[in-house]
Amino acid sequence: MATSPLDAPRRALQPSFDPAFRADVLRGLAGPAKSIPARWLYDETGSEIFEAITQAPEYYPTRTETSLLQAHSADVVRQSGADAPVVEFGSGSSLKTRILLEHMPKTTYVPIDICGEFMDAACAELGARFPGLEILPVEGDFMQEVPLPSCVKSSDGASPEALGFFPGSTIGNLLHAEAIDMLRAMRRTLGEGAWLLIGMDRTKEPDRLIAAYDDALGVTARFNLNLLTRINRELDGSIPLDGFRHLALWNDERSRIEMHLEALRDVRFEVAGTPFTMDHGETIHTENCHKYTPQGMEGLLAAGGWATQCHWSDADGDYSLLLARAHDHARG
């Protein structure tokens, strides 16, 4: 009987090894079209490199979204309330959150992130900046419903109209059905009457998009290639790091940038005791970054149980910031 890659022996795996990471990598490398979920790009090193990406000259989303937050955070707080608990999904460095919290420095802030070490450092900086802010970090996967601290969501499911925060157009990493599932999970996490402030990137010229995901300094390339380093470190991998390059492509049919790791030659390697081969030119698909029309954004939110209340964009129409509210009839 053939052995499944998921049943391969766990030899010399690092103490920090995550069984879900192992399963996703082995499953993704075993298929004819190789792929690994984008969430595994964000270990501590990956999270730090991503913050550097946001400063690259070609990467317009962070600058544009920051300007929109500076212009409209006061409007957001007027609608959601200055004491609304702020629950950030995938908090990272929480740099943009500071703009929002300037208008509500004595509220409760609940960052949710898959990387606890990176989140803890960001929380320490926020605590020093806002001494009256109560910070209750939660390490977890926000793709599922996440139990919140009791002061934010009571045991009977009621919520003091929390404000969910999901910047960075991270929703674009997901396929349409996955994005809807995540929005529904956020709605369940936050409860009835909750608000959601979300950033989403708009469709535009492919050349600008490709440049934003393949910057001249190679920061995005380091971010993508770090996934192979993580696999080698945590899953006893023997992937030749010099055998791959970062590749960013525009898929017009699906309106998305795709990030891949392309084999520069025929390669053989092992991961967690399982052998793999890849041909020259074959790729591992690591991330999607979908881009949306304004109508598509509001339709996606509605499918996920959220009714758009405000929709802001920059003068060039590059990026959108939307404020939505959970509507009663949505279930899922």
Image: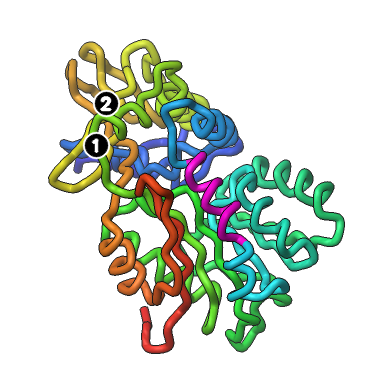
Q: In which quadrant of the rendered view does residue 217 lie?
A: top left
Farthest residue, direction front: 315
Please report the bounds of the magenta region as a residue range: 62-73
Residue flagged by tag 2: what amino acid is it? Answer: Phe
* Residue at the image position 32 percent from the left and 49 percent from the top: 202
According to the picture, the residue beneath numbered tag 1 turns out to be 205
- Is residue 278 visible in this depiction of the protein? yes
- Is residue 12 visible in this depiction of the protein? no
Whether residue 236 sits left or right of residue 76 in the image: it is: left
Q: Which mark is residue 9?
A: none
Residue flagged by tag 1: what amino acid is it? Answer: Glu
Q: Is residue 85 above or below residue 249?
A: below
Counting from the top left corner in percent of width and height, residue 98 is at 68, 51
Instruction: Tell me the colour scheme of the image.
Output: rainbow
Mark 1 closeness class: few <14, some 14–19, many ≥20 residues within 10 Å: few
Quarter holding the C terminus is bottom left
According to the picture, the residue beneath numbered tag 2 turns out to be 276
- Are the two marked residues, 2 and 1, in contact with CB atoms closer than 8 angstroms? no
Farthest residue, direction left: 253
Q: Nearer the viewer, residue 38 or 299?
A: 299
Magenta residue check for 69: yes
